Structure formats: structure tokens, C-alpha cells
Image (cartoon, rainbow, N blue to C red):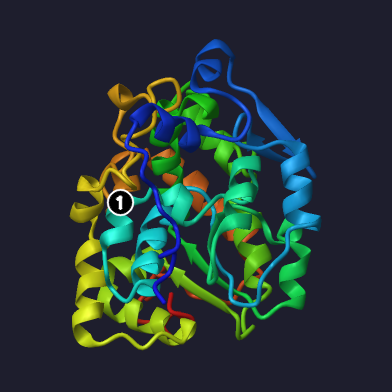
Amino acid sequence: MEFLQDLQFDDDDKSNKEQRFCGPCMPPQIFQEMPAQYVQYKRIKFPCGYNSVESLQVAENEFQVRDDDIFNVTYPKSGTVWMIEILSLILNEGNPVLNQSVLNSLRAPWFTTQLGLETAHDLPSPRLLTCHLPVQIFPKAFFRSKAKVVYTLRDPRDVLVSYYHFSKMCIPFGEPKSFNHFFESFLNGEVLFGSWFDHITGWLKLKGKSNIFFITYERLQQDLRGSVEHLCRFLGKELDEAAITSVVQNASFEAMQKNNMCNSTMLPKEVMDQEKGTFLRKGICGDWKTHFTVAQSECFDRAYQEKMQDLKEIFPWQPGGLEGNTARSLHF
């Protein structure tokens, strides 16, 4: 039985799709009328309009996790949408029809929002679910289940740059005052969804759990086919060579840029101002080098060493990263 085959979407009216895509509690015009705000839950800031304290409380404490659920977890701008496409294709044995006809927010709902909670409740199993939650407020029921997490992480310098450009065009996030201001806010954990360093170190404490799979954006870039094969084994999905090839082709950056079901072009201007940028902007590694000054690079390195000193992992963005044995063993 193919993933989501029971879902039927006959409504081709763009305005209705935009309304469902925007968020749980506010129509698109509201975003245009309000200044950027945020919801704070357990000292973490979340974008207003998509999340509420109530929906976050439900997600953490009441969300009913199924044993065959698959959670796509990331810190923002770390490959979230890319992994949705990869996992959707794997669950559909390489068939791209649903990826090309159903919005990604409906295929892999953001269950921290009211709309996402409702969508997740109605999905047939196995469900693919998406969030940016830090581990300390992840659904409590997960830790009593057999459900699985795929956690994707990325060079924090590239995350910072991508997050900056995204915030410029995503109205609910609030346009940054300047790159330097955003740089400082990121290092201090004062951006939406909190500190990258806390997010990563929190989740990595669960390293070694058989139902949690860690992978990096850089590994996906270097060897997408091999990464898909690793993910298939983790998910217990046996795909033939043709199906794996289809996953790789349809999850390529070029294919995603053309796919309106994942490239955010369906979002209204009141939510995503396409004139200020492109959601799927570059899809590369190392773009931070074109943005950081020497002083910023040195500042970031000092902060990174201080905040990550207790971790023994070697990441791809560190010297010897992709070639290191530790990196390979964790699919980094």
C-alpha cells in the first residue's frame, strides 16, 4: 500500500491551497497587517501565526505517536524540505506522483501547529511528520514508542547564511536589520527556534539509539544515492535500483526547484515575498565564505569551539570531516 494513497485532493483552487499552507490560525492578510512577532514556549521562540502555546503544548504532551511514525527533524535551514522529498519518495518506492501533486505540508505536516496537528491526525500510516523541535520539548510519547527520527544537521555557518536570506523573504520571521545583526543573534541563540548549538548537542545525546538516524546536509550533497540506500535500510524499505534512481532524480535540487509542491511558490506574498529572494536559493555547501568577513569567521570559530567542546564527533565541515571514521559511522 503506497504512502498516502488514501488522500485525495480534488481542489485545484490556488487560494484554498494557499490558505491551508499558511498556518493554523491566521489568514494570509493578517501577516501583512501585523509586525513580526513570536510565540515563546519553554524559553524557545517560535514564529507567530504558525504556532501557538496551545499547539506546542499538545505536540509535546498529548500528541499520539504511532509506532510506524517517521519524524523528519531539523534545525531550520538544514535540509528540511530536501529530506521531506527524499523520505516521501522512499515511502512511495520512488513513485514521484504524490511529491508532484500534494503540498509537502500535507504530506509531512508540521505537527507543532494546529493545522499540522489536524492533518497529522487524519493521515494514514505510516505518517511522515516534520518539526524543528529541540529534543527537550519533542513529543513525550515518542520515547515510549518504536517510531523513528531522521535528524539532518548542516554546517552552522551555512545554516546562518541561509536562515538570514530566508528571514528576509518570510514575513512572519521578520526581516533582519542587517547581516551582522543576524550573525550576532544567531550566535547568541536569539533567533526563532533558539540556539543551533543547543539543538544539535541536545539531539546528539541520543546518538546510538536504534530508532534515530543522524545524517548531514553535506553527506547528502556528496553521495545522495548512498544516503538514500542508508535511509532505506534504516526505514526497512527494500527499493530496487530503478526506484532508488527515481528517488535520487526527483529529490535533486533542480527537480525540487521546478516542483511547486515543495518550492514555496504556492505561498501568498503576505507570507513569502518571492521578490526578496528564492526559497530554494542555491542548495550548496560553503556559501558562508561569500558572506563572512575575516572577523566574523574568527568570531564564529571561537564561539563554535566553546559551545561544541564537549562533543567528540567529527563533522564534515571540520578538517577531515567526510573522510573521518567517526563521521562515516554516523552518516555524517
Q: Is residue 263 left or right of residue 233?
A: left
- Does residue 223 appear in the picture of this structure? no
Q: Report the residue at 80% width, 45% height from top.
A: 42
Nearer-the-camera pick, 294 or 84: 84
Q: Report the residue at 39% width, 27% height from top.
A: 15
Residue 308, horizontal then vertical, whole percent: 61, 63
Residue 186, horizontal then vertical, whole percent: 56, 40
Q: Is 111 placed above or below 211 here?
A: above
- Amino acid under disc 1: Ser
The image quadrant where one finds the N terminus is bottom left
Q: Is residue 42 left or right of residue 308?
A: right
* Secondary structure found at label 1: helix
Residue 20, horizontal then vertical, whole percent: 49, 36
Residue 205, horizontal then vertical, whole percent: 68, 73
- Does residue 252 appear in the picture of this structure? yes
The residue carrying pointer 1 sits among few (fewer than 14), some (14 to 19) or many (20 or more) residues within 10 Å by Cα, namely few
Q: Is residue 62 left or right of residue 276?
A: right
Residue 229, image quadrant? bottom left
| Residue at the extreme top | 33
